[in-house]
């Protein structure tokens, strides 16, 4: 599934740090690896808890940064995570977005936040 990934400047900075850490030059590749690894953890409450879902600088301040070609299965899993946290009673809930790409982008932003705050929890 190809889509434009919406990120904020802070997420681009984190991606640059992760690329340097892992000696990977592609932003798309680093995002796909971290997404896959985060999904394999099967610890959604740890990754998407309220500390990581809170918007900084406005929920809708993200902009399309680059196109990403994500595995359809991973895209679907990210959509399901978004849907789960949009309606959960255990958190403040994700905000509504206009498109699936924006919803998946929100979920990926949470994974990027998690990678920054818990760097030893995800291995790629």
Image (cartoon, rainbow, N blue to C red):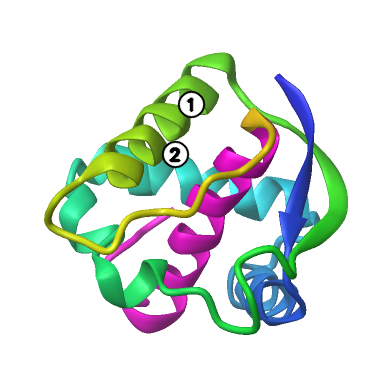
Say which of 62 and 12 sits in front.
62
Looking at the image, residue 99 sits to the left or right of residue 123; the answer is right
Q: Secondary structure at mark 1?
A: helix
Task: Name the dominant secondary structure of the magenta segment.
Answer: helix
Q: Is residue 120 visible?
A: no
Residue 2: x and y in percent read 78, 25
Q: Which residue sits at x=22%, y=48%?
A: 44
> Which range of residues does the magenta coloring cover?
101-124
Residue 75 falls in which quadrant of the image? top right
The residue indicated by pointer 1 is: 74
| CB atoms of marks 1 and 2 within 8 Å | yes
Label 1 to label 2: alpha-carbon separation: 7 Å
Q: Which residue sits at x=32%, y=55%?
A: 93
Residue 41: x and y in percent read 23, 45
The residue indicated by pointer 2 is: 36
Residue 6: x and y in percent read 74, 54
In the figure, 3 relative to 43: above or below?
Answer: above
Q: Is residue 88 visible?
A: yes
Residue 109 falls in which quadrant of the image? bottom right
């Amino acid at each position: 599934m190809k889509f434009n990934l919406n990120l904020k400047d802070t997420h681009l900075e984190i991606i640059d740090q992760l690329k340097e850490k892992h000696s990977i030059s592609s932003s798309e590749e680093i995002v796909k690896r971290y997404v896959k690894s985060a999904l394999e953890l099967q610890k959604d409450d740890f990754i998407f808890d309220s500390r990581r879902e809170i918007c900084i600088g406005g929920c809708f301040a993200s902009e399309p940064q680059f196109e990403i070609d994500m595995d359809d299965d991973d895209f679907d899993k990210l959509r399901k995570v978004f849907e789960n946290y949009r309606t959960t009673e255990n958190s403040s809930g994700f905000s509504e977005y206009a498109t699936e790409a924006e919803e998946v982008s929100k979920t990926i932003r949470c994974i990027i936040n998690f990678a920054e705050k818990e760097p030893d929890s995800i291995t790629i």
